[in-house]
């Protein structure tokens, strides 16, 4: 989830502090992706809904601690029942987005998962126009061509169909988030604090119904292998720190810096995953993914120049 700070000036902190913050941001983002992949694929814990439920429970607890106790961000109270219902809807859509990403990690390589995420600008532009009738400049739309072309090249027909389903779920939450934040003026830490419990409540019956005996299986695995329990707890906490570091990096640098770092993050995650999981990668697939990343960079530059 993107931190909604677009024009905040960076506070006067040392370069070592900023570098450390960026390092933690990279580590948490890439770490949660690789740990999700390990648990859902290599380890064999084939329960993406329950894993997402663990993420949302950790986000519920840790976001409250960060905002209410540690004062990472000023607390913002809900002003109306209408606002509560909007955030509840976002919580459900957001958890579907995360579930979609985790499902893709269960069956597909990390490189494909990152390719789905890299197409966010394309779907955001399309849905933003459908939802708000806001048009971008022609150059912005032109830069979206290599974004989609690269994914088509890298995916193939069967994976492309899977991609379209998962991408629709993942990207729609970004668009809804953009529209909601624009109206409600909640910062990302407060939004997560209100949104995560709703997502957890929604996911609990879904996990119990759709993933049979998942609680019993999880307890049995934890008893057989204590490391699994630590992996699960660390992975869930890391899912929260992804959101926290998004917020902090944007606060202490800028939203543009976060965009630039995000462009490189996907490529780094792909390379690291190949080294760890030994996924076979074709030249065509890497060429397609590279084209997608180049398209995202051009898109961000076009957006910046149009402002």
Image (spheres, rainbow, N blue to C red):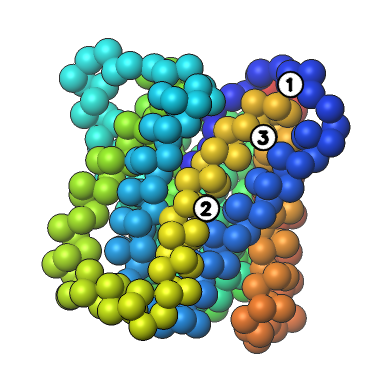
If you read the primary sequence from the N terminus, does the residue marked by circle 3 or circle 2 appear first? 2
Q: Secondary structure at mark 2?
A: helix
Is residue 152 or residue 224 the one in the foreground? 224
Q: Are marks 1 and 2 in contact (CB under 8 Å)?
A: no
Judge depth for marks 1 and 2 and give the one in front: 2
Coordinates of residue 81 in the picture (x, y in percent): 18, 19
If you read the primary sequence from the N terminus, does the residue marked by circle 1 or circle 2 appear first? 1
Coordinates of residue 208 in the picture (x, y in percent): 17, 65
In the image, what residue occupies the spot 42% across and 18% down? 75
**Residue on which the image places disc 1:** 10
Is residue 88 or residue 123 the one in the foreground? 88
Q: Are marks 3 and 1 in contact (CB under 8 Å)?
A: no
Coordinates of residue 250 in the picture (x, y in percent): 65, 31
Q: Secondary structure at mark 3?
A: helix
**Residue on which the image places disc 2:** 238
Q: Which labelled disc corresponds to residue 249? A: 3
Looking at the picture, does residue 305 appear above or below residue 158? above
Image side of residue 302 versus residue 64, left or right:
right
The total number of labels drawn is 3
In the image, what residue occupies the spot 76% across and 42% down? 20
Give the alpha-carbon distance from disc 3 to disc 2, as whole Å: 16 Å
């Amino acid at each position: 989830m993107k931190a909604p700070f677009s024009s905040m000036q960076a506070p006067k902190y040392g370069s070592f502090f900023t570098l450390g913050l960026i390092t933690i941001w990279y580590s948490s983002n890439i770490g949660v992706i690789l740990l999700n992949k390990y648990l859902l694929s290599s380890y064999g814990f084939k329960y993406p809904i329950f894993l997402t439920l663990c993420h949302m429970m950790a986000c519920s607890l840790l976001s409250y601690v960060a905002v209410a106790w540690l004062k990472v961000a000023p607390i913002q109270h809900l002003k109306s029942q209408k606002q509560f219902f909007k955030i509840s809807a976002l919580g459900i859509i957001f958890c579907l987005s995360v579930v979609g990403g985790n499902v893709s990690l269960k069956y597909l390589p990390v490189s494909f998962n990152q390719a789905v995420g890299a197409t966010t600008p394309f779907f955001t532009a399309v849905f933003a126009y459908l939802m708000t009738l806001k048009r971008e400049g022609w150059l912005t739309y032109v830069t979206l061509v290599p974004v989609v072309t690269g994914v088509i090249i890298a995916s193939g027909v069967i994976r492309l169909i899977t991609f379209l389903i998962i991408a629709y779920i993942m990207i729609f939450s970004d668009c809804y988030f953009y529209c909601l934040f624009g109206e409600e003026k909640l910062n990302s830490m407060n939004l997560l604090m209100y949104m995560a419990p709703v997502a957890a409540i929604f996911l609990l019956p879904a996990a119990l119904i759709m993933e049979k005996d998942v609680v019993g299986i999880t307890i049995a695995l934890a008893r057989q292998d204590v490391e699994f329990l630590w992996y699960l707890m660390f992975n869930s906490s890391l899912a929260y720190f992804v959101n926290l570091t998004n917020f902090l990096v944007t606060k202490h640098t800028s939203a543009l810096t976060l965009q630039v770092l995000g462009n490189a993050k996907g490529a780094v995650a792909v390379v690291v995953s190949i080294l760890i999981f030994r996924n076979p990668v074709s030249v065509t697939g890497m060429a397609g993914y590279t084209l997608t990343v180049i398209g995202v960079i051009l898109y961000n530059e076009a957006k910046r120049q149009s402002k």
